[in-house]
Image (cartoon, rainbow, N blue to C red):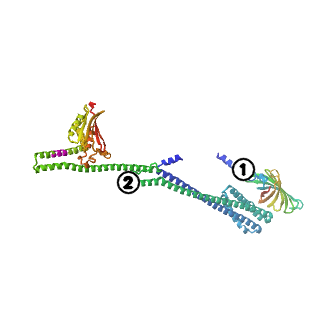
Amino acid sequence: MSSLRHRLKSLSLALRMIVASAVLAALVASVFAVLINAVSGLNDATRREAHAKDVTAATLRLEKLVLDLETGVRGYILTGEDGFLKPYREARQELASGRLREFERLASTTPEQGRRARNLTTAIRQYEQDYAVNLLNIARANPPAARDFVAREEGQRRTDEIRGQFTNFLAAENALAAASAGSADRQADRAVALAIAGLIASTLLIILFGIYLARSTARPVRGVAQAATRLAGGDLSTRLDEKGPGPGEVGELQVAFNQMAEQLERGRAELESQNEKLRESERLKSELVSIVSHELRTPLASVLGFTSLLLTREVSPEEQRRYLEIIDAQGRRLSSLLNDFLDIERLEEGQLKLARELFDMGTLVGEQAQLFAGQSEKHQLDVVLPPRPLPVRGDPDRMAQVVANLLSNAIKYSPEGGTVEVVGQREDDRVRVSVRDEGLGIPDELQEQVFGKFFRGDAPASGIAGTGLGLTIARSLVEAHGGTISFESATGEGSVFWLELPIAANDR
Amino acid sequence: MTRLFYVFVIAAGFAVIGLSNGWSLGSSAATGPGTIRITSREISRVRVDAGRPGRGPGDTEIVRLNLFNKRIKRQPIGHADYVCTFVTSGTRSCTATIFLPKGRLVAGGSIRFPELYELAVLGGTRLYDNARGTLTVIRTTRRPRRDIFVFRLTG
């Protein structure tokens, strides 16, 4: 049973429909066959009934002929008038024309009736040949002999015998006809019952077929339609149960639907991702424009302002020098900004060319620390370097840029001053440089964005200048040298930024 | 093969006819009621005139007949002997002994018209032991004298 169900389940929808239609057709054909059989049976019964009527009519006709024979003979014997022989002669003529053979043929539907018919025709022939013909001859030669009681009794005996046989024959024929009619009635009743049963079975089968179609096709298809509606409504997570009741084609439709839904969901995710990137790009662009305009405007305003002062006013040589120094500083700041922009663009486009020189990271860190040492009176710069060199292969200028950025940030984000500790050291096969400050620290929620472009945290509110590109450039440069850069920070306690670079191979 | 088949069919046909007629004659009589039909042909008739000349009481007539069942064979299947004594000028009292293949039947009674008469079957021998019934005889031709014998046996 389960194997049959499994086999049925493995059939395609088309094949299942063909099988179901074939079963239905077979049942309907069976019902029709039963009905045809019943109709055929009724036809047979009708034929038998008609035949029985024919036999009865032939029997009655034969009985009449016998009566004519008897009447004619008796009339002639009693009167001696030839006119009384008319019915006798007509009856004999008709009997001679094959009436008896025809009767035998008609009556031979059953062996028993055939035997009765043969006995009857024999008795009639003997009545005619043995009795009637001879008695008439006797009557012509010796009329008293023909009128003798012996002749009467013999005639009576023979006709009684024939009548008795007629009676028996007709009774048997009627019984046969009645049995045939009864059989036909029973057959018709049985056929009607079978037809009704077949009709009910066909109806039930059609209903079952409909339910089956609804379950196996319409329901899964409706499920697909509903899922498609949900999908169209934006619910791309909609999926269909592929192990559902649907047959082959519907199952394929469900699988195809799920694949389509997955594709759509993936496509939408990609679109959303791209959209997010576009939004981020737009935001960055807006921020860039804002920062650039702000960052460039400030030094540019200073340059223009002090240049205007120098051109329009008579100032002392000391003031003139101070103004020029300010203009120089702001010009450098402008230049630095532009360099940062250029660097980030080159890094993003992969066009920044880096030298592959062997240099001592310790020396580089020392020089940068020395450059920043005198920039702020509030800060104390502690540099800890090992006695041995920290050889690194790469672009020393770019690494100097990175270290300078870390030092610059440490000073900038420690507005209250404090110690800035710079440490250079070896760690296994790496060179590690860390810059620790005692500044503002970075709130936890912002730490993930620290290396993002243009990220400046609370710096703008605190009046700390900058583009938010320094750490982005630093990370790109360190990673371009095969190193890593990271930090640890706590709000109000300061931060430590560190970078690690592979130590140069020949110095390991 | 074909010839053998026809021989078989003819033999079977004769057997069926024989069983239902002459050959089964004794069997029919012995086993119960039945009708036997055979024909006869007179072969001799002798009248002994006693008393006054011409037919009259006391005259004796002895008649011998051959019996046939033409459906079985053309030759006689037996014969019958009639011994009649005239009781009037037209009526005679007869005793007939009918010799059939499987026994004899004895019939007797009065015959007024020899063209059509009826005798009582009084008994028989062998197969027809204790036979009872009637024998009706109807003349079919006068020259030669031929009759139809119808035995209606009741037991």
Type of secondary structure dominating the magenta stretch: helix
Q: Residue at x 17, y 49 (%)?
A: A302
Can you see residue A348?
Answer: no
Name the residue beneath numbered marker 1: B15
Q: Nearer the viewer, residue A274 or A40?
A: A274
Q: Chain for mark 1? A: B
* Residue sitting nearer the eye, A95 or A296: A296
Q: Secondary structure at mark 2?
A: loop
Instruction: Give the quadrant of residue A82.
Output: bottom right
Residues drawn in magenta:
A326-334
A115 over A335 or under it: above or below: below
Q: Amino acid at mark 2?
A: Gly
| Chain of the residue that carries numbered disc 2 in the rendered image | A
Front-most of residues A492 and A69: A492
Please provide percent x and percent y for residue B15. Answer: 72, 50
Dot 2 corresponds to which residue? A234
Q: Is residue A329 magenta?
A: yes
